[in-house]
Image (spheres, coloured by chain):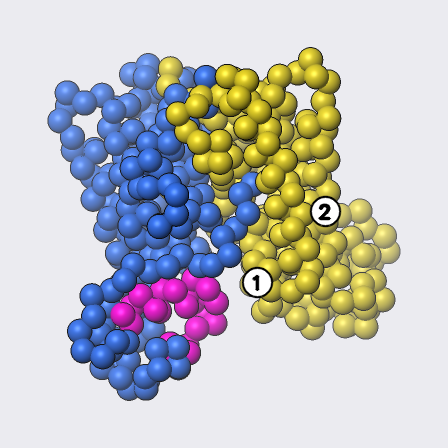
Chain colours: A yellow, B blue
Amino acid sequence: MPSPAEEPPEAPAPARRGRPGYDQETVLRRAVELFNTQGYDATSVGDLARDLGITKSAIYHHVSSKEALLSAALDEALDGLTAAVDRAVAADPDHTALERLRAVVEESVRILVRHLPAVTLLLRVRGNSEVELSALRRRRTLDEKLARLVTEAVAAGELRDDISPDLISRLLFGTVNSLVEWYRPGGPVGEDELAHAVATLAFEGLRA
Amino acid sequence: MPSPAEEPPEAPAPARRGRPGYDQETVLRRAVELFNTQGYDATSVGDLARDLGITKSAIYHHVSSKEALLSAALDEALDGLTAAVDRAVAADPDHTALERLRAVVEESVRILVRHLPAVTLLLRVRGNSEVELSALRRRRTLDEKLARLVTEAVAAGELRDDISPDLISRLLFGTVNSLVEWYRPGGPVGEDELAHAVATLAFEGLRA
C-alpha cells in the first residue's frame, strides 16, 4: 500500500492575466486544491477569497458560485475521459477490442496526470448535490462503455475468461484511479512511462 | 473507473452484549462508519451518541476519547496487514520472493475485505494528529518491507525488470487499495475470488 503523498496534487501553473490570483483560471485552480485538501463541503467562498488574498466580491466577478467551480472542475475531468473513451470506441475496426481497451487505459492515465486535481476531485464525489449526481451519471456512462469494451475483448478471446468481465473492468480502472493517491507530476516517473507501466501490469502482468 | 458504491462499507455485525448499541465493539463499529461517511474531524462524540441513541457519558463508559476509537480502528487494520507482511517475509526460504509477494497480495486483499471499514479509514489518514502520524509511520514500515520483497523478486529475475521496483510496488498496492472504493462484502464476488483475481491481474496480466 503506497503511503499517501504529503501534499495534495499541485494544479498546473495557470495562464495568468493581470495581478496573480485575479484571473478565472487561477480562482478555479485554487478552488480545486482547497476542495481536495479540506473537502468541498467544508470550503466556503470566503475561505477561497482568504486563500487568494482577494475579496469575495472579486471572486464573484469571475464565478457565479462555489458550485459553478465544482461543476467546471468535474467537467474538465469528465470531458477528457469521455473523449478518450469515445475515441477508442469509435476507432478503426482494424483495431481489436484489446488494442482499443489498452489505448483507453493509457489515455486515461495521461488525462489523470494532466488533470490530476480535477480527476482527484471527481473520484471523491459522492452525489451530495445535483452537480455531483450529474457527474456520477457521466461517470456511470463511461463505466458502461468501458465494460462493453472489456466484454467485447473477452468474447473475442483476447482477454482471459477466468475472471468475470465486470470484475476485470473494476480492477482495471481501480488500478488507474489509484494513481491519484500517490502520483505527483514532476517526480521521477513521467506520463508516458506511467501509462506504459499501468497497461503492462494490467495486460501482460508483472511476472518476468 | 468504477463508480463509487452508493453506501459506505458496512461494518461486520459486532458481537453484542446487553442492549444493542451499548457494547464497546458496537461503539467502535459505528464510530468507524461515521468517520468514513462524514470524516473523522467532522464527527463528534455527540454525533456518535445521537447515532447510537445513547448518551455521551454512556460512550465514555466504553472509550476514553474519539481519538482512542480512531487509534483502535487504525490498529485493527495495521495489525492485520503487518501480520500478513511479516508472515511472508519470514516464510520458509523454499518459497521464492515471487511466491511470498503473491501471498502478501492475496492476504492483503483478504484483510481488506474482512476489515473493510478500518482499512478504508486507514487509507484516508493524512497525518493530522499524533495518532494519524503514528499510523502513517506503521504504513511506511509496511511499504518498505513490501518494496524490499519486490526488489528481491526483480533481482531474482522473477518479476519484469522494465518497470522500476519502486513503481511496481506502488502500482501493485495501489491496485489492492483501490478495492475499498467499490468492493462490498456480501456482493457477487467472494473474498477468495477477489484475492485470486487481483493477484492474477497483477502477476499474469489480463491478456488471454
Q: Residue at x 42, y 44 (%)?
A: B179
Q: Residue A39 shows which numbered tag?
A: 1
Q: Position of residue B22 (x, y in %)?
A: 24, 78
Q: CA distance from mark 1 to mark 2?
A: 18 Å
Q: Quadrant of residue B131?
A: bottom left
Magenta range is B26-49
Secondary structure, magenta segment, majority class: helix
Please name the residue that numbered disc 2 is placed on.
A76
Q: Residue A195 shows which numbered tag?
A: none
Q: Quadrant of residue A41?
A: bottom right
Q: Quadrant of the C terminus of chain B?
A: top left
Q: At label 2, which amino acid type do we have?
A: Glu
Q: Is residue A77 left or right of residue B61?
A: right
First along the sequence among labels 1 and 2: 1
Q: At label 1, which amino acid type do we have?
A: Gly
Q: Position of residue A82 (x, y in %)?
A: 70, 38
Q: Position of residue A2 (x, y in %)?
A: 41, 41
Within 10 angstroms of label 1, few (less than 14), some, or many (20 or more) residues?
A: some
Q: Quadrant of the N terminus of chain B?
A: top right
Q: Residue at x 65, y 58 (%)?
A: A132
Within 10 angstroms of label 2, few (less than 14), some, or many (20 or more) residues?
A: some
Q: Residue at x 67, y 38 (%)?
A: A81
Q: Please name whichever residue, B162 or A134, is drawn nearer the observer in this view of the structure.
A: A134
Q: Chain of mark 2?
A: A
Q: Is residue B196 above or below residue B4?
A: above
